[in-house]
Amino acid sequence: MMAPDETWFRRAVSRILKIMAALAVTGTLTAFLWRGWKWAAGFALGALISWLNFHWLQKLTDVLGGKRVRRGSAVFLALRYLLLGGGAYVMLRYSSINLPALLTGLFVSVAAVVFDVLFELIYARE
């Protein structure tokens, strides 16, 4: 059985992931309608990187919380920013994806967390 804090945390993560998906789809469609496919691709890629980073941070909290993790996962968590930076450099250097749109997409996870905090402030019933 999960502790109450663990249940609250899992529910918050679930909400944040749903909000991230909604923001990613809405932002990508808006960028496509407003500026075209290069902006839409940039925003979508930024949102994907944002989701990956959120996922990896969630795994890090699992490690810090005492859950067992494979040794390779710990190395990967330590190198994640190097991997993200290298991947972003290659994509931006050799593709026509729009940089401002990509940078905007990177804020999808931050916006989702802000929306979840607002949700908690408005609807918390304790």
Image: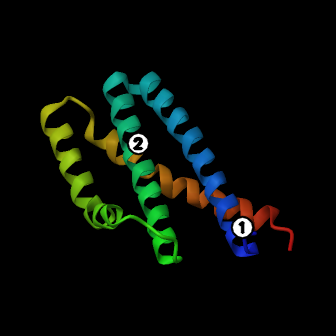
Q: Earlier in the sequence, mark 2 or mark 1?
A: 1
**Pointer 2: what residue?**
48
Percent x, y of residue 105? 41, 44
Rendered image quadrant of residue 78: bottom left
Q: Is residue 114 left or right of residue 38?
A: right
Residue 35, compared with residue 101, is above or below; it is above
- Neighbourhood count class around disc 1 (C-alpha, 10 Å): few under 14, some 14–19, many 20 upward: few
Q: How far apart, in angstroms, are the residues tagged by discs 2 and 1?
A: 25 Å
Number of on-image labels:
2
Q: Amino acid at mark 1?
A: Trp
* Residue contact between numbered discs 2 and 1, judged by CB atoms under 8 Å: no
Question: Which of the 4 image quarters holds residue 125?
Answer: bottom right
Along the line of sight, which residue is nearer the eye, 124 or 70?
Answer: 70
Residue designated by label 1: 8
Q: Please, what secondary structure does the residue beneath circle 2 have?
A: helix
- Colour style of the rendered protein structure: rainbow
Q: In terms of depth relative to the viewer, which is nearer, 60 or 27?
A: 60
Q: Amino acid at mark 2?
A: Leu
Q: Residue at x 23, y 54 (%)?
A: 83
Q: Position of residue 37 (x, y in %)?
A: 35, 22
